[in-house]
Amino acid sequence: MPDKINEIIEELALANRILAHEGVLDAFGHVSVRHPADPSRYLLSRSRSPLLIEPDDILEYTLDSEPVQPPKAHLYAERVIHGCIYQARHDVIAVCHHHAPAVMPFAIAGKPIVPVFHLGAAMGEDAPFWDQHDEFGDTNLLVVKQEEGHSLARALGRHSAVMMNRHGATVVGGSLKELVSRSIFMCQNAEYQLRALALGAPQPLYRGEVRLAGALSLMSNVVTRTWEYWSMRLEAAGAMPPRRSSAKAARRPVPKPSRVTPRERRKGRRR
Ligand SMILES: [Zn+2]
């Protein structure tokens, strides 16, 4: 299991950097993954910009979004988004909350993003809206209270994404790779939808097309291919995360015992 944990933690650091490099996350936003051995916990970075996240930044949280170990660093204020969704959706393995420029015009105008090209079907047929003001009145728009997180999770329902009025979006996935694919394709879809509007009213995918194309875009060989592609782009930019320090230590080769006798060593020192 330690190898599995190291692997998932390194994958989470990479997911953060891929989503930042592809323009989904900026200085803000965050990605989490459910703990592979304990579904009542999840993994999320300390408060840090996603492009800078390293495996050693990743912390473990309970589903009440409390850190398992006393924190030595600042934590994300909006981590309840993750905990509340994991509580409500047992099928969800990974969560991304973001304020991507591609979705913001829709979040501000309150207009729905709908799949307008085949890969856009990864987001599902639609994404419901959640307006924090409806239930909680004036706030700073950050989702920080448990009741706010639960309300957002209710709005998400069985969907793959929820739009947050005047704030951004939250996307879920059945794995980290699926989440990364869905988040990026949903942003691409939003960009195409907006651009196509200049040419006339875009024709969204038919319901059956969403089902068929959506299933295709989330096949494991497809998400592995996209993950590899986005990882390569990140590597070319020189922004790959370092290895986890405990994983590095575990893999460090054990030094061979010296064949030099203590007497020889003393002699050698005199030379
Ligand atoms: Zn936010």
Image (tube, rainbow, N blue to C red):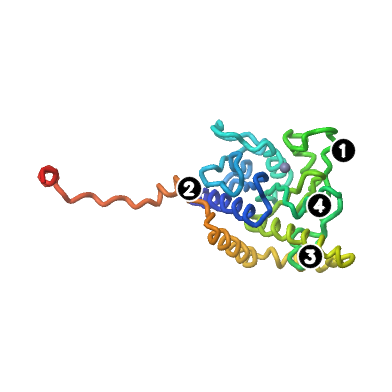
Q: Rate crowding at label 1 as few (under 14), some (14 to 19) or many (20 or more) other CA atoms within 10 Å.
A: few
Looking at the picture, tell me which residue is in the foreground, 64 or 200: 200
Q: CA distance from mark 2 to mark 3?
A: 38 Å
Which residue is labeled 3 in the image? 211
Disc assigned to residue 244: 2
Q: Residue furthest top?
A: 70
Does 75 appear above or below 107? above
Residue 66 picture location, percent across and down: 63, 34
Q: Secondary structure at mark 1?
A: helix
Mark earlier in primary sequence (2, 4): 4
Residue 214, image x and y in percent?
75, 64
Give the mark nearer the N terminus: 2 vs 1: 1
User: Under tag 2, what secondary structure?
Assistant: loop
Mark 4 or mark 1: which comes first in sequence?
Answer: 4
The residue singled out by tag 4 in the image is 105
Name the residue type under label 3: Arg
Decide: marks 2, 4 in contact (CB < 8 A)? no
- Quick check: which quadrant has ligand 1? top right
Which comes before the other along the chain, label 1 or label 3? Answer: 1
Left or right: residue 208 versus residue 29 is right
Q: Earlier in the sequence, mark 2 or mark 3?
A: 3
* Disc with the residue nearer the chain's start (4 vs 3): 4
Calculate the distance from the C-alpha at mark 1 to the C-alpha at mark 3. 32 Å
For label 1, the residue is: 134
Residue depicted at x 69% and y 38%: 78
In percent of width and height, residue 58 lies at 56, 43
Look at the numbered disc 4 and give the secondary structure of its residue.
Answer: helix
Residue located 68% across and 53% down the image: 24
Q: Amino acid at mark 2?
A: Arg
Q: Nearer the viewer, mark 2 or mark 3?
A: 2
